[in-house]
Image (cartoon, grey):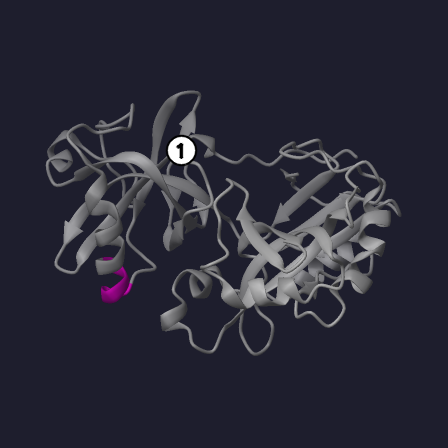
Amino acid sequence: MTATVVQKLPEGENWLYELKLDGYRALIVKDGDRVQIRSRNEKDLTAAYPGVAAAGRRITARTAVVDGEIVAVDANGRPSFQALQHRSGHPDHIVTFYAFDLLHLEGRDLTGEPLAERRAHLPKVLGKSGVLLSLELPGTAAHVTEAVAALGLEGVIAKRRDSRYDAGQRSGAWVKLKLDKQQEFVVGGYRPGPHGVDALLVGYYEGRQLRYAGKVRAGFTPHLRRDVFASLTPLHAERCPFVDLPSSRTTHWGGGITAEQMQEMRWLKPTIVAQIRFVEWTAEGHLRHAAFLGLRSDKRATAVHRETKLESNV
């Protein structure tokens, strides 16, 4: 079940608020001593996160399906997507799993029950397993927004307490307020540099067309540029995958790419996804001050669209 982006949090006693965690959405599926961690695009992440798998085995139930987020946190509990992506460069961060929903318990399907009832089982099920509970944030929508913004965290998720679990759906019963502008983009090419990748060329799908969003140069170290270059090399393609390049002009903010600049680029099959932080969208529909956070293996490129904030009237 996924959340819709909104401009402000909904108010009312029927809504609960949680931190928007900056990590990988996943399920812990436990069946006796067997535990599997599954991403939302059905990839098996068990071997990649042995600590999370070990914590999952200590869940008190014999069989359970727990929904949550794999997160890398520092000593103060602050999550970092970059640390999750590049763990060797962030030894001070601990990878853990925050649980926020329970879909099955001891052979019983809970998805038709209200969220409040599903969550009520979690403290006992998690016990002292090491799987952490995503806590409800107290206060009004305004107080929660102010507090999370003051801490510099990514955002807030609001969920209706009576919501059933609609797998794969954006029903409006779960919404998210992003205080830190970032989203996934498809990598369609790059400009090579002395350390591997000088800049990524990213975009999003509009229907079946890949539209160009901007160049991304910030957020890289020399080591990271080489690692990303190694990931992109097998995807080289002859043609530009963006339907709206070349541009008639470029901008100071790294917007368009002229026909002459196209010769500097290397094009890719648009199958890989990157997480990008940015300040805003320009009037031309390009990213301003974009920075690379990491590559994502848990998202399908064809599912990446430009995120737009909706007015919340619920």
Q: Which residue is mark 1?
A: 285
The reply, left or right, for residue 84 in relation to residue 56 is left
The reply, left or right, for residue 182 in relation to residue 21 is left
Taking the spot 57% from the left edge, 62% from the top edge, the residue there is 53
Q: Foreground residue, 69 or 207?
A: 69
Count of residue discs: 1
Taking the spot 28% from the left edge, 53% from the top edge, the residue there is 217
Q: Secondary structure at mark 1?
A: loop
Residue 149 at least partly seen: no
Q: Give the amino acid at mark 1.
A: Gly
Height in image: 55 above or below 297? below
Q: Foreground residue, 297 or 308?
A: 297
Q: Look at the image and give the residue range highlighted in magenta.
A: 221-225
Height in image: 68 above or below 186? below
The reply, left or right, for residue 81 in relation to residue 289 is right
Q: Is residue 90 magenta?
A: no
- Quadrant including the C terminus: top right
User: Residue 159 is drawn in which quadrant?
Assistant: top right
Q: Position of residue 34 (x, y in %)?
A: 60, 56
Q: Position of residue 181 (x, y in %)?
A: 51, 49
Q: Position of residue 281 (x, y in %)?
A: 44, 40
Mark 1 neighbour class, 10 Å CA radius: few under 14, some 14 to 19, many 20 or more: some
